[in-house]
Image: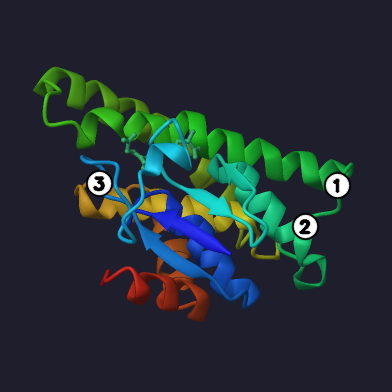
Amino acid sequence: MNLYFMPGACSLASHIILHELGVEHNLIRVDGASKRTADGKDYLQINPNGYVPALQLDDGRVLTEGPAILQYLADSHADKDLAPQCGSFERAKLQQWLNYTGTELHKNFGPLFAAAATPAEKQAATAKLEKRLQSVERQLEKTPYLLGDKFSVADAYLYVILRWASQLSLPLESFPSIRHYQERLAKRPGIIAAQKDEGLA
Ligand SMILES: N[C@@H](CCC(=O)N[C@@H](CS)C(=O)NCC(=O)O)C(=O)O
């Protein structure tokens, strides 16, 4: 199984889950500018959208879109209990959080990473993120993980996004439950191992 990644990008969530599940994998780095892979391929032949993550199975089939990869990995190792059963209300809650993280958090980081974004655009994105993080804070005041008592693939995705917040000095002081969650998750062996493999602190 190959995971195509860029260090610290949203692909880190899928990478964390591969470690959490103990699945053997090859980690293949993609150069964002040239779209070439570290093993000399044209990444656009693997994911024509050019972004990471992409998961390539041993039979060559490719799955893209982080939330789909996360759920595929969890469902392929259901004994590890990283996603509620398909069709259950709890599974819909997982999808609620994956979608919220993708559309309301992840995508609002765009202007903060974009060199071409104006200070006003960055300020607007920060304000939006602070607002959207309030729902996360409210959930984590009540439960240790997004879905309750158990770590799930949604937590891996949220962890990666919160890592960006720390990196970009987005203030999390007013979110004490998020900060405690972040500290707790950072101690998980799967998270430590994935970050180490990507050369991250
Ligand atoms: N819809 C995609 C978005 C993936 C995405 O935004 N990937 C970013 C890294 S976090 C990327 O590869 N950006 C480089 C590019 O678009 O060229 C998903 O959820 O997997």
Q: Is residue 109 left or right of residue 101?
A: left
- Tell me which residue sits at (58%, 76%) in the image: 24
Instruction: Mark 3 or mark 1: name the one nearer the start of the chain.
Output: 1
**Mark 3 C-beta to ligand 1 under 8 Å:** no
Rounded to the nearest angstrom, the CA distance separating label 2 from label 1 is: 8 Å
Quarter of the image with the C terminus in it: bottom left
Kindly identify which numbered label has been placed on residue 75.
Answer: 2
Q: Residues within 10 Å of mark 3 (few under 14, many from 20)?
A: few
- Looking at the picture, tell me which residue is in the foreground, 60 or 165: 60
Instruction: Mark 2 or mark 1: name the one nearer the start of the chain.
Output: 2
> Hey, what amino acid is under mark 3?
Pro
Visible residue check, residue 102: yes
Looking at the image, the residue that sits furthest to the right is: 87
Instruction: Mark 3 or mark 2: name the one nearer the start of the chain.
Output: 2
- Tell me which residue sits at (48%, 69%) in the image: 26
Q: Residues within 10 Å of mark 2 (few under 14, many from 20)?
A: some
Where disc 2 sits, the SS reads: helix
Kindly identify which numbered label has been placed on residue 86.
Answer: 1
Q: Position of residue 174 (x, y in %)?
A: 33, 47
2 and 1 marks in contact (CB < 8 Å): yes
Q: Which residue is mark 3?
A: 171
Point out the frontmost of discs 3 and 2: 2
